[in-house]
Amino acid sequence: MLKKTILCALFAISLSGCVGLNTVSMTQVPAERDNKITTNSSSWNFIGINFSNVFVDEAIENLKTQCPTGKIEGVYTKHQTTGYVLVFKREVIVSAYCNEV
Amino acid sequence: MPIKLKNILGLSLLMLGGCSQLHHVHIGEIDQSQGTLTPFTLKVNELGFDAAKAAKIGADVAKSASTSEDLELVAFILAISNFGPKTGNPVYNDAYADQVLAEVIKVCPSKRLTGLTSVREATNAGPVSGEVVRINGYCINSF
């Protein structure tokens, strides 16, 4: 009986989705789209207990270093949370275009 | 009857639970071609209060069983009356974020802004929270 219950629970877990899409945002997309840059930063937590959202700022710094003298345009930002059984990964994924002026 | 250990543990977890929450992020365009950038951060926040959670905590620490049951019912009524889509805890002022625009306009002496990032986040402590709108950005200085 216990075996069946465990198997059933495992089957149910395999069926359930594990990614939650929190927010998506986009800025004006430029005509010149040759130089695409991407970055992401994340923060892990246990049962949703977090103490800081600094990982967002890391993504911005990563983006800036990839385009030190240009203009970062067409910024697509995705904020998602992935669950791995009691442990969660919060993630900001960013893509943009770097255009030299 | 003294407060049980499990209640204290439960309360501690409630107080700790989800201390910092990130609701929304929007990263704007960053122009590093016009000059050096000086970063700035603006933050406005408002007190959020989850009455249902407060009643639930009350039910957990109540000394008598009947009080606990009553508070459980109150928590349930509060929870269903506030049921629906929401971001963070309810606040008592729906215009607290509006001052951000005026602040952003004032922050750069050069009046040239870039890389505006809007973050909607919250800091929770049990039933109360700080519902925060944070704007990060850069002032463009001339070369």
Image (cartoon, coloured by chain):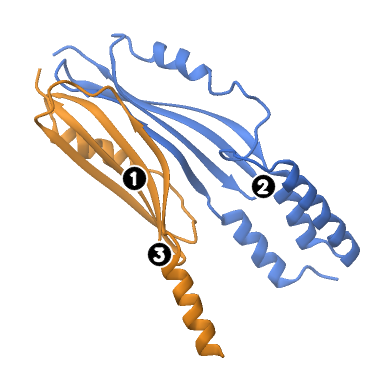
Q: Are marks 3 and 2 in contact (CB under 8 Å)?
A: no
Position of residue A35 measured from the top left corner of the image (x, y, whole percent): 10, 32
Q: What residue is rendered at 21% in x and 39% in y? A: A62
Q: Of circles 1 and 3, which is in front?
A: 3
Amino acid of disc 3: Tyr
How many C-alpha atoms fall within 10 Å of the one at disc 3: few (<14), some, or many (≥20)?
Answer: few
Measure the alpha-carbon separation of dots 3 and 2. 27 Å
Q: Chain of mark 2?
A: B
Amino acid type, label 2? Pro
Q: What's the mark number on residue A36?
A: none
Residue B64, visible in the rendered structure: no
Q: Do discs 2 and 1 belong to a common subunit?
A: no
Quadrant for residue A24, please give it: top left
- The colour with which the image depicts chain A is orange
Question: Element type at marker 1?
Answer: helix
Q: Secondary structure at mark 2?
A: loop
User: Which residue position holds label 1?
Assistant: A55
* Shade of chain B as shown in the rendered figure: blue
Labels 2 & 1 near each other (Cβ < 8 A): no
| View extreme (top): residue | B110
Residue ID for mark 2? B127
Which one is in front in this view, the residue at disc 3 or the one at disc 2? 3
Q: Is residue B102 at all visible to an observer of this figure?
A: yes
Tell whether B96 sits left or right of A23.
Answer: right
Mark 1 vs mark 3: tell me if same chain. Answer: yes
The residue that mark 3 highlights is A84
Image x and y of residue B24, in percent: 44, 37
